[in-house]
Image: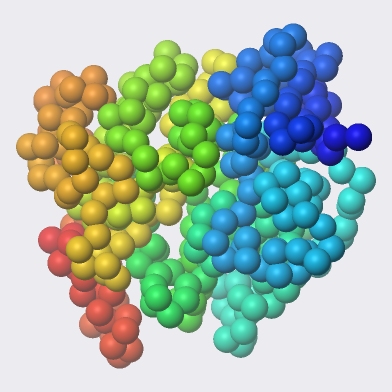
Amino acid sequence: MPESLKVAVNHQTIGLLAKENNEFVFNYKDSPPDGFVSLTMPVRMKGYVHPVLHPIFEMHLPEGYLLSIIKKHFSKLTDTDDFGLLRLLSADVKGRLHYESSIKQRILPFTLENLLHPEHSNLFNELVDRFALHSALSGVQPKVMAQIENKATLRLDDYIVKAWGVDYPQLALNEYFCMLAVKFAGVAVPEFYLSDDDALFVMKRFDVLEDGATLGFEDMCVMQAKQRDHKYNGSYEQVAKTIKLFTSPHYKMVSLQQFFKMIVLNNRLQNGDAHLKNFGLLYENMDSIRLAPAFDVVSTTAYIYSDVPALTLLGSKKWRDKAALIKFAVESCDLTKKTADHLYEECELALGQARKQVEVRLQIEECMEKKKILTHLEHLMA
């Protein structure tokens, strides 16, 4: 009997994912046309057969820190290959696409105040103990998906909580000020916070609406039919092409403009981790497909002095100047030079605005480790 999982879209079972004879097979069953699991896998009679787990399902698998935690807990009890991990975490995959599971477990939530004003330094370890085995999150950075209770409405919301290790000191502080620059540039970003002790970067899920409705989200690995191990293989031109191919007509230009700003800011802030999984598309239906908000923007050269971009731009991986970025905007993002110049200037103004906040923080900061990160950002934002 093959291993299998019932797959659902918006609380309606639409097909079955199975592993059989070292192949992964997904078949739709009684699914409406809008019940597709992925923009790249439309509803059809013929099954989708892959030698590895389909990218849309692999997108839900943990990496790095979370993967090691989960394998440590469960490797003696069950298979922890890709399909085993997906079955293990299936009950906690929440979104437009999810899985039928008989496992229902009540987890005691935190409040946002608990996270932003921690009373002890072991808060992240407490979060890991409570939420790690229920966090279907990709990415190698230490992070968990925590349920946060709104004290006013008593509603539970999901927030991604990130910490940092000795290899990347003060990463939360780094990400907070980088994301501020992105926000100031007018690029859509999730709701985000920094804890009082700078230990945690907290970001609200952007694929869940205030009324609880869930949106579809697919990262660029999914859209380009690549496995997570290939997230550094590709170019920003290919991402722009994917945006043009899949976004809805009335969202296409604004998505390309937003993407161009993201590329400008990732270059100016020297983010060497802007790979395929850190860009994606968001949608309610086929008429609302647009570029997802920006996330995971950090300056990696604060830790790796000689770091380079994650993907190629204009044929190579190196930090680009304004002329090269404007060339990319015109040739790959279908922008006029006048529009590209205007958007670039908006990014420069945003960096200046963020730099002022960095300078204010530097004036009162006493920790040398934090001052080093802030000084690096101040230099890049100049």
State the image coordinates of residue 175 (x, y, percent, origin top left): 39, 63
| Residue lying at 63% horizontally and 61% vertically, measured from the top left | 67
Is residue 214 visible to the viewer in this orientation of the structure? no
Q: Quadrant of the C terminus?
A: bottom left
Picture quarter containing residue 355? bottom left
Determine whether 288 is above or below 20 in the image: above
State the image coordinates of residue 152 (x, y, percent, origin top left): 72, 59
Is residue 282 visible to the viewer in this orientation of the structure? yes
Q: Which of the two residues, 285 or 113, is positioned nearer the viewer here?
A: 285
Q: Which of the two residues, 363 or 249, is positioned nearer the viewer here?
A: 249
| Residue lying at 56% horizontally and 72% vertically, measured from the top left | 116
Determine whether 130 is above or below 102 in the image: below
Q: Which of the two residues, 359 or 147, is positioned nearer the viewer here?
A: 147
| Residue lying at 27% horizontally and 81% vertically, measured from the top left | 371
State the image coordinates of residue 129 (x, y, percent, origin top left): 73, 73
| Residue lying at 24% horizontally and 24% vertically, measured from the top left | 332
Q: Quadrant of the N terminus?
A: top right
Q: Which of the two residues, 141 or 203, is positioned nearer the viewer here?
A: 141
State the image coordinates of residue 70 (x, y, percent, origin top left): 70, 64
Which residue sits furthest front? 21
Residue 100 located left or right of residue 156: right
